[in-house]
Amino acid sequence: MPDAQATSTHDWNGDSGKRWAANLDRLDLMLQDFGDAAIVAAAAQPGEHILDIGCGSGTSTFMLADRVGPTGHVLGVDISRQLVELARAATPKAAPIEFHLADAATADFPAEGFDLLFSRFGVMFFDDPVAAFANMRAALKPGGRVAFVCWRSAAENDWVRLPMTAIRDIVQPAPADPDAPGPFAFGNLYRLTDILTTAGFADIEVRPFDTRLAYGRSDTRDAALDDALDMAFQVGPLSRALADQPDEVRARAAAAVRAVFATLPGDTSVLIDGAAWIVTARNRAA
Ligand SMILES: C[S@@+](CC[C@H](N)C(=O)[O-])C[C@H]1O[C@@H](n2cnc3c(N)ncnc32)[C@H](O)[C@@H]1O
């Protein structure tokens, strides 16, 4: 499969991709427990062929490759050129791994080429999710599995809800469509199940996974609060809400968000509740 000239629908080749790449260590720490839970649910076996959707810099791809071993193979695809290049640069020689730059919604995957479709937070950005999942399903063997982790709603995720509430008297972002492509597009369980059913999946299981995630990191409590604040200003909904605001507004917002982070536990990170779905299903085609 050749690299596609990927077009970005959500800025993954622009600002979002750059910010994600600049915060890789923080994001890996934040997402680690969610990714681990999805990897367990995926139950990858030695020798399997796996497609890792929206693989970013490859953290989950490398974990899956360890599980399939030398007789298996993992193909990571991502729409962000910058993240695919980072993933390729980090790939050990002779590892059963490839990374392709591609839009998973339309990519020409080998038909029935994979035992498992996997994703760690990489499948919520499709403009037409039914068409995208149908395209990915065609790449699955009959009876093949899908396993992914995605966020529940923003209202259930304190790492978004608390900072956004803290700035509500300072900045009023336009109300977001909860179903619009973006991190929280699969928050609605019924919509998510409907998308997968319509795209041709069966045996769909969606289970909540809640944990306290580690937001930011440093050696002392004070420095950890600063690091968490810096991260919130660089990636995620708060960063987007404040992107075009004047310095004076950003300074007031920073003070409000730091104050709310200071109410949360954690010594070397700010520990905040996160809420995700762990989703598993099978290709209905027998
Ligand atoms: C929230 S990040 C997660 C990255 C990675 N899975 C991780 O956990 O670190 C979402 C990823 O999905 C990718 N992505 C978004 N839309 C995509 C699409 N249509 N096809 C392929 N990748 C896409 C983005 O470029 C980004 O790397």
Image: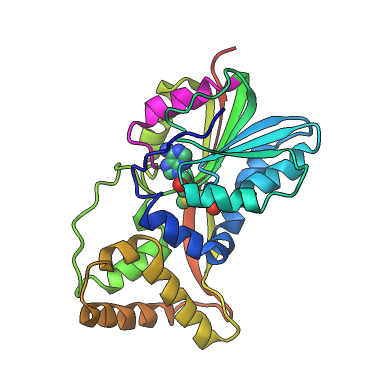
Nearest the viewer among 81 and 159 is 81
Q: Residue at x 23, y 67 (%)?
A: 244
**192 and 67: which is toward the camera:** 67
Q: Nearer the viewer, residue 151 or 58?
A: 58
Q: Position of residue 16 (x, y in %)?
A: 39, 56
Q: Is residue 282 above or below residue 151?
A: above
* Quarter of the image where the N terminus is located: top right
Can residue 194 be seen here? The reply is no
Which image quadrant is residue 74 in?
top right
Among the 4 quarters of the image, the one containing residue 114: top right
Residue drawn 22% across the image and 82% down it? 248
Q: Is residue 173 visible?
A: yes
Q: Nearer the viewer, residue 84 or 140?
A: 84
Q: How many marks?
A: 0
Tell me the magenta residue range.
125-140
Instruction: Name the residue located 54 percent from the left edge and 30 percent from the top edge.
Output: 2
* Residue 281 picture location, percent across and down: 55, 29
